[in-house]
């Protein structure tokens, strides 16, 4: 009997010793280590997961879901710093999900083996850019962007590398116009780049934009002498800049500017993230701020002189009267 117990103990020890120490079981998983990383919605749809940890992860018991349907992920191992993709054709065959993802945008969810939600993302409308995916700008990072699809591979960080941005827009001009700015250290060839409003796309003429430089395009709808084939709605619309590979590198959802016909809408400083209503500064550094739009806070900053300098969110800018209104 003692020999039998000894052999049984030895057998169990051998089994335990053979378990791959590099595979992390789901109940040991740190939530942030397995993530939704990239989603493609314009057919055939697919979802990519990424393991940002240093240890392989067992996905047994995990599930993916769209806005209405949950699907159990097949058992499998995702290596450290590795990827796994699942086609989303709605057929639930050969490892594909039982749901599709709406190109018009919808929420996608990831659950662990305890049916706990560990990641989710809502995709934007990708129907206007059918060759692009919605992905984390950096694998496992916090920022999501529309960019070229990189199924099963490290994400294309195009947006973080390209410094050309839509910088200022005049939507009530004669004609309307749009300014690009190159905030990078090198000149950039705009050959093959395109601008688009909500209904039309226009290929930019072959040209180079210098480091720290500007280029302005009239938007009169005529498509002549370097002007765009669309006008810009002063009631607000989506304006998009696309590179020669069809990747969106900048996009601005223009607000209603009907009340500001004498002014433009631009970045508070060239290339920055904050947009404001301002005095026109066509082909020059963005300057005098008139009014902020669509900010959650509502407050004012008093400055000592009729024309002076003020700080907001660590940015220095010029103001044209004694009170800077922020909305």
Image (cartoon, grey):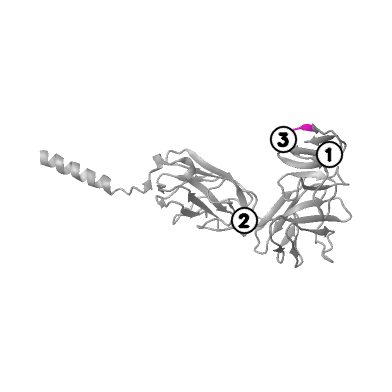
- Which corner quadrant of the image does residue 45 belong to? bottom right
Q: Earlier in the sequence, mark 2 or mark 3?
A: 2
The secondary structure that dominates the magenta segment is loop
Q: How many marks?
A: 3
CA gap, disc 2 to disc 3?
28 Å
- Which corner quadrant of the image does residue 308 belong to? top right
- Which corner quadrant of the image does residue 26 belong to? top left
| Residue assigned mark 1 | 308
Residue at (38, 43) in percent of width and height: 25
Q: Position of residue 41 (x, y in %)?
A: 58, 54
Q: Is residue 84 above or below residue 209?
A: above
Segment tinted magenta in the rendering: 296-300
Q: Residues within 10 Å of mark 2 (few under 14, many from 20)?
A: many
Looking at the rendered image, the disc whose residue lies closer to the viewer, 1 or 2, is 1
| Residue assigned mark 3 | 296
**Seen in the image, is 111 located left or right of residue 245?**
left
Residue at (55, 55) in percent of width and height: 155
CA gap, disc 3 to disc 1?
25 Å
Helix, strand or loop for disc 1: strand
**Seen in the image, is 78 located left or right of residue 68?**
left
The disc at residue 147 is 2
The residue lying toward the viewer, choosing from 307 and 122, is 307
Helix, strand or loop for disc 2: strand
Specify the quadrant that holds the C terminus.
top right
Looking at the rendered image, the disc whose residue lies closer to the viewer, 3 or 1, is 1
Q: Position of residue 147 (x, y in %)?
A: 62, 56
Q: Residues within 10 Å of mark 3 (few under 14, many from 20)?
A: few
């Amino acid at each position: 009997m003692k020999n039998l117990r000894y052999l049984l103990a030895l057998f169990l020890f051998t089994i335990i010793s053979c378990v791959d120490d590099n595979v992390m079981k789901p109940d040991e998983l740190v939530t942030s280590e397995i993530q939704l990383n990239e989603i493609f919605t314009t057919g055939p749809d697919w979802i990519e997961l990424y393991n940002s940890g240093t240890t392989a992860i067992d996905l047994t018991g995990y599930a993916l879901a769209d806005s209405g349907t949950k699907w159990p992920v097949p058992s499998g191992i995702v290596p450290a710093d590795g990827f796994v993709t699942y086609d989303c054709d709605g057929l639930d065959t050969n490892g594909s999900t039982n749901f599709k993802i709406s190109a018009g945008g919808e929420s996608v969810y990831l659950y662990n083996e305890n049916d706990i939600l560990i990641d989710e993302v809502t995709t934007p409308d990708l129907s206007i850019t059918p060759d692009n995916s919605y992905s984390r700008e950096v694998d496992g990072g916090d920022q999501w962007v529309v960019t070229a699809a990189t199924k099963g591979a490290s994400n294309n960080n195009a947006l973080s590398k390209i410094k050309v941005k839509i910088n200022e827009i005049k939507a009530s001009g004669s004609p309307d116009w749009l300014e690009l700015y190159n905030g990078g250290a090198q000149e950039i060839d705009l050959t093959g780049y395109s601008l688009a409003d909500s209904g039309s796309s226009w290929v930019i003429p072959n040209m180079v934009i210098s480091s720290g430089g500007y280029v302005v395009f009239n938007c009169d709808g005529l498509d002549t002498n370097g002007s765009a084939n669309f006008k810009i709605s002063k009631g607000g619309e989506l304006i998009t800049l696309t590179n020669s590979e069809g990747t969106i590198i900048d996009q601005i959802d223009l607000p209603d500017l009907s009340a500001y016909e004498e002014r433009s809408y631009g970045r508070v400083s060239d290339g920055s993230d904050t947009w404001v209503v301002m005095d026109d500064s066509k082909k020059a550094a963005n300057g005098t701020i008139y009014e902020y739009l669509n900010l959650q806070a509502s407050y004012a900053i008093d400055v000592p002189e009729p024309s002076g300098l003020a700080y907001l969110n660590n940015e220095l800018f010029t103001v044209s009267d004694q009170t800077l209104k922020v909305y």
